[in-house]
Image (spheres, grey):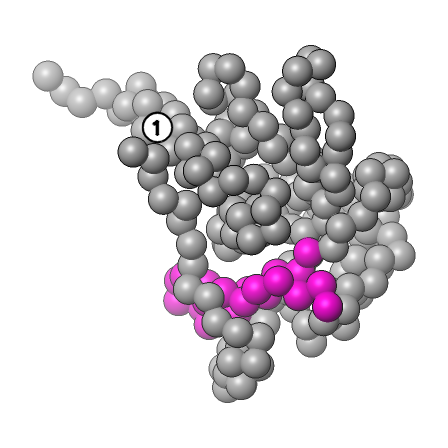
Amino acid sequence: MSAAVPELKQISRVEAMRLGPGWSHSCHAMLYAANPGQLFGCIPMRFSVLMQMLLDGLLGFPEGFWSLEDGLNRVLGLGLGCLCLTEADYLSSHLTEGPHRVMAHLYALQLTLEQLHAMEISVVHSRDHSLEVLGLVRVPLYTQKDRVGGFPNFLSNAFISTAKYQLLFALKVLNMMPEEKLAEAVAAATEKQKKALEKLFPSSS
């Protein structure tokens, strides 16, 4: 039986905006496009999703800490060209884990594949490139025959804060990947990490 897809506690946007002044609001943007291509001519690509490698080596989505859409659009304008997100692109709000009182809001914007590619090119010339942001990566939304290559391997990377949960949530609710495939990828990634730890720290006989 496959493991369940992990999730954080979700609340509505209205509930989130009613939280007191002790809370910070962190907004993230998932940019994606339908991709009709096939890997090796036989593995459907389905969608291309952009994430970014941050200066601390963690993967995450473009992020803003101001007033929801305005703050997020400010960050997108600095690093990812002329994009503009609105309340219509809002997807979810999640309570983050840990000592800091941060509400994570996720937005999702579908582009054409041509727009997505242009975004990848333009980010190289952005002000923050190679400083706060080391570059963009595409999420491999497929699993190879060994059941580890592709998405399971990607999930084995280190993600900042809620980014991994937000990615899984968005893929599920936007019907970009069947929930059973998500669960299989999570289980494969967890097993891979477990085996890696066992090699590093073998139990004494």
Against 26, residue 161 (above or below) is above
In magenta segment, residue 94: yes
Q: Please state, as top left, top right, bottom left or bottom right, where the C terminus lies in the image.
A: top left
Up/down of 86 relative to 152, above or below: below
Going by the numbered disc 1, the residue's amino acid type is Glu
- Front-most of 90 and 73? 90
Dividing the picture into quadrants, the one containing residue 130 is top right
Left or right of 24 on screen, residue 198: left
The residue lying at 80 percent from left, 48 percent from top is 111
Residue under pointer 1: 191
Mark 1 neighbour class, 10 Å CA radius: few under 14, some 14 to 19, many 20 or more = some
Residue at point 87%, 38% (across, down): 114
Q: Is residue 196 magenta?
A: no
**Screen quadrant of the N terminus:** top left
Q: Position of residue 201 (x, y in %)?
A: 27, 24
- Describe the element under mark 1 as helix, strand or loop: helix
Image coordinates for residue 165, horizontal then vertical, percent: 49, 51
Left or right of 58 in this view: 53: right
Q: Is residue 71 above or below residue 52?
A: below
* Residue nearer the viewer, 53 or 106: 106
Residue 102 seen from this side: no
Residue span colored magenta: 88-108
Total of numbered circles in the picture? Answer: 1
Dominant SS type (magenta): strand
> Residue at image x 69%, y 76%?
67
> Toward which corner of the image does residue 129 lie, by quadrant?
top right
Position in image of residue 103 (x %, y %): 52, 69
Front-lying residue, 178 or 159: 178
Residue 30 in sight: yes
Q: Residue at x 54, y 30 (%)?
A: 151
